[in-house]
Structure formats: structure tokens, C-alpha cells
């Protein structure tokens, strides 16, 4: 396929889904790729730049994740660029936690049709299914952002409560995000042009990569520059930086859901179990007419593509 074929905007549903995918993955990478590992490693702000220490009592006077600056005689953050106010976890624990997230995400994504959308009568999914779960995807990051920004547990650096809360929020997000990703994976194949599935899917996953790049760069900027610098020995307030990243992730989730509403694929309605119908299925006559219209449109696209190829061969 040529570049013109790849960027040919003749499939509105796929193009809109690709734009939604960009913001869906940015909603995760705005806090997962850069801020979260730094926050998990960053030490408590208590005593950094103010706690006196000496070469004789380095281990006893400085908090985990800091060291004694023997020249100035005060405790200093090992990595001031990562900020302070985090959980001060060891590298092995941080790596295991991030690896566990990836494993959980992958497993839930593969189980979604059997354990989630199937029992809820949302199989096969349509645009309404993704809008439903897209709005739910906003909840964990919004709760996390509000708690980090205004909760007393982070103001007072209550390590145990901070750790438990963050683990619960991230596990909840991993499950919900995996469900969204699974639904997207079905929709992209469903919306792909039948005569160029590989090109359509490739264009969609290119949007996925752009979203991840956008989230990663944006998260680095937010985490680095949001939050007051307490002093030269501690770095910035990591709690404020991570909260800003969670707020940005929530905004991206909201944009992804709102963009998805523009897709024309709602004829089959939306249910949430056998007893609850959120959006009624449209009349069968209208539904069949819509399917016929889509088939005619795809046949027309295929015929136009064939004619163009024939013209190229003649030239």
C-alpha cells in the first residue's frame, strides 16, 4: 500500500475509533510510564534538606531513598529529579509491581468476552459498549487525582495507607482499561475495510503509538514542573506532580469516550445484563437497512479501488 492509501480518509468509523484510541492510551501513559515508577521510588520529604546528619550516622538519620550529604551535613534525595513524597520502595518491588500490572492487564483483556461483555449481553460490542466502558475508565484516575491532591493521608505521608490506596486504584484501572482495550480490538477489525484489513489495522495502531508518545512526553513535563520545589536537596513535590498526571489521564479518558460517540454503530443498542437495557435496539427494519447501506458503501469503495488499480496498470 502507498502512503496515499494508508492516509485515505474514506472510513469514518475507523478514523474516529483511531482518534479515540489515541486518547485512550494517553489516559494510561500520562501517569504509568514516567510518573508512577519515579513516585514509587521517591523518598519521604521529611527531613530532606533539614535533617542534620554526619558520616558516622548515615544509615540511622536519613530516610530510605536519601543519603547524607556530608559536605553540607544534611539528608539529600538520591534522585532530586524524581521528587519527594512517594513510597520509597526498592527497585525489585517497583519492577515486580509494574510487571504485575502488565500481566493483569493482558489476562483481563483476553478474558473480557467470557467474563465481562458476554455475561452483560454486550457481545458483539458496538460503539455504545465502548462509550459505556470509556466513561467508567475515567473513575479510577479521577478518584486517584482527587485523593492525592486533597487527602490527609498524602499530606501527612502515611505510608501504609498511601500504598494500599495506590495499589487498589491501579488494579481497578488495569481491569477497566483492559476491558476497553479488548472492545477496541474487536471494533477495529469490525470497522476495517474488507479489501485492506492490514492497512486499516496498521493505521489504527499507528494512532495507538502516537497516543502513547503524547502521554509519555506530557507526563514527564507535568511530573517535573507541577509541584513546588521544597528545597535543593529534596526536589519537587512528587504528590502534586502525580496528581496532575492523573487529572490529565482522566481528561484523556473523557475525550476518548466523547470521540467514540460520533461513530455510527448504535443499531443493536446497549444492555447491562439480561434484565437491564440502557439503550433499546432499533427496529429490525432500520437495522437491516443500515446493514445493507454499509454493504453497498463497502462494495462501492472496493469497486472504486479496483478501477483505480486498473487505471494505474494501463498507465
Image (tube, grey):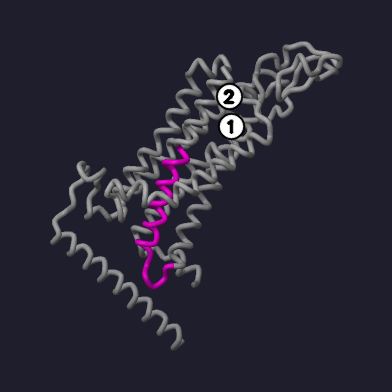
Say few, some or many: other residues with alpha carbon within 10 Å of mark 2 (under 14 / 14 to 19 / 20 or more).
some
**Up-down relation of residue 190 to residue 177 (above or below):** below
Residue of label 2: 227
Region rendered in magenta: 173-197
| Residue drawn at x 22%, y 54% as measured from the top left | 268
- SS category of the residue bearing label 2: loop
**Up-down relation of residue 46 to residue 145 (above or below):** above
Whether residue 313 is visible to the viewer of this picture, yes or no, is yes
The answer to whether mark 1 and mark 2 are in CB contact below 8 A is yes
Residue 34 occupies quadrant: top right
Q: Is residue 55 magenta?
A: no
Q: Nearer the viewer, residue 311 or 129?
A: 129
Q: Nearer the viewer, residue 133 or 102?
A: 102
Residue of label 1: 223
Q: Position of residue 254 (x, y in %)?
A: 38, 39
Residue 186 occupies quadrant: bottom left
Amino acid at each position: 500500500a502507498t502512503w496515499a492509501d494508508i492516509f485515505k480518509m474514506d472510513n469514518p468509523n475507523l478514523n474516529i475509533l483511531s482518534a479515540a484510541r489515541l486518547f485512550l492510551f494517553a489516559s494510561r501513559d500520562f501517569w504509568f510510564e514516567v510518573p508512577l515508577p519515579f513516585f514509587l521510588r521517591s523518598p519521604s520529604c521529611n527531613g530532606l534538606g533539614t535533617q542534620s546528619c554526619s558520616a558516622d550516622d548515615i544509615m540511622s538519620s536519613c530516610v530510605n531513598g536519601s543519603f547524607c550529604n556530608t559536605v553540607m551535613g544534611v539528608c539529600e534525595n538520591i534522585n532530586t529529579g524524581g521528587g519527594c513524597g512517594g513510597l520509597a520502595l526498592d527497585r525489585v518491588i517497583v519492577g515486580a509491581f509494574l510487571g504485575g500490572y502488565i500481566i493483569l492487564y493482558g489476562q483481563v483483556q483476553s478474558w473480557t468476552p467470557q467474563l465481562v461483555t458476554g455475561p452483560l449481553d454486550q457481545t458483539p460490542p458496538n460503539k455504545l459498549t465502548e462509550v459505556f466502558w470509556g466513561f467508567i475508565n475515567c473513575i479510577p484516575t479521577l478518584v486517584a487525582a482527587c485523593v492525592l491532591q486533597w487527602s490527609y493521608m498524602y499530606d501527612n505521608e502515611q505510608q501504609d495507607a498511601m500504598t494500599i490506596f495506590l495499589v487498589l486504584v491501579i488494579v481497578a484501572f488495569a481491569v477497566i482499561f483492559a476491558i476497553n482495550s479488548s472492545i477496541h480490538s474487536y471494533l477495529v477489525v469490525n470497522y476495517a475495510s474488507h479489501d485492506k484489513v492490514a492497512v486499516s489495522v496498521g493505521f489504527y495502531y499507528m494512532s495507538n503509538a502516537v497516543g502513547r508518545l503524547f502521554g509519555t512526553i506530557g507526563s514527564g513535563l507535568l511530573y517535573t514542573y507541577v509541584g513546588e520545589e521544597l528545597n535543593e536537596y529534596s526536589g519537587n513535590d512528587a504528590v502534586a506532580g502525580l496528581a496532575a498526571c492523573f487529572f490529565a489521564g482522566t481528561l484523556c479518558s473523557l475525550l476518548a469516550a466523547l470521540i467514540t460517540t460520533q461513530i455510527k454503530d448504535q443499531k443493536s443498542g446497549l444492555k447491562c445484563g439480561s434484565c437491564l437495557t440502557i439503550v433499546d435496539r432499533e427496529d429490525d427494519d432500520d437495522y437491516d437497512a443500515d446493514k445493507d447501506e454499509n454493504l453497498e458503501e463497502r462494495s462501492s469503495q472496493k469497486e472504486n479501488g479496483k478501477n483505480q488499480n486498473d487505471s494505474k496498470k494501463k498507465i
